[in-house]
Amino acid sequence: MPIVNVKLLEGRSDNQLKDLVSEVTQAVEKTTGANKEAIQVVIEEMKASHYGVAGVRKSDQ
């Protein structure tokens, strides 16, 4: 049972997240041969103030 964790900054629409789950599921099914029913996709949205690159929060850019 593949479990895919996707972490991204918040701000995507519900339709974008729906498409993401569908596309990731299809990719895992195609590349691993796992049954679609067994594939789980977990999306974690982060606030820009809770994520930083090179010592700078995304909210401060």
Image: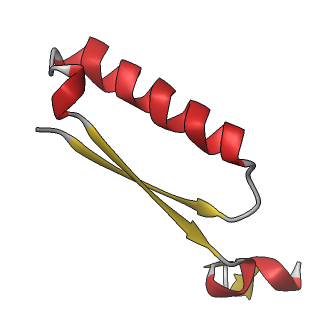
The correct choice, above or below, for 36 with respect to 30 in the image is below
Q: Position of residue 24 (x, y in %)?
A: 43, 31
Residue at figure coordinates x 30%, y 25% from the top left: 28
The one of 54 and 43 positioned closer to us in this rendering: 43
Query: Horizontally, is 44 left or right of 1 in the view?
Result: right
The correct choice, above or below, for 44 with respect to 29 in the image is below
Q: Position of residue 21 (x, y in %)?
A: 47, 37
The color scheme shown is secondary structure
Q: Residue furthest right?
A: 61
Residue at figure coordinates x 38%, y 21% from the top left: 27
Disc tally is 0
User: Which quadrant would residue 1 be assigned to in this image?
Assistant: top left
Residue at figure coordinates x 26%, y 19% from the top left: 29
User: Which quadrant would residue 9 be assigned to in this image?
Assistant: bottom right
The one of 43 and 7 positioned closer to us in this rendering: 43
The correct choice, above or below, for 34 with respect to 43 in the image is above
Query: Horizontally, is 44 left or right of 60 in the view?
Result: left
Q: Residue furthest left?
A: 1
Dividing the image into 4 quarters, which one contains the C terminus?
Answer: bottom right
The one of 15 and 59 positioned closer to us in this rendering: 15
Residue at figure coordinates x 60%, y 44% from the top left: 17
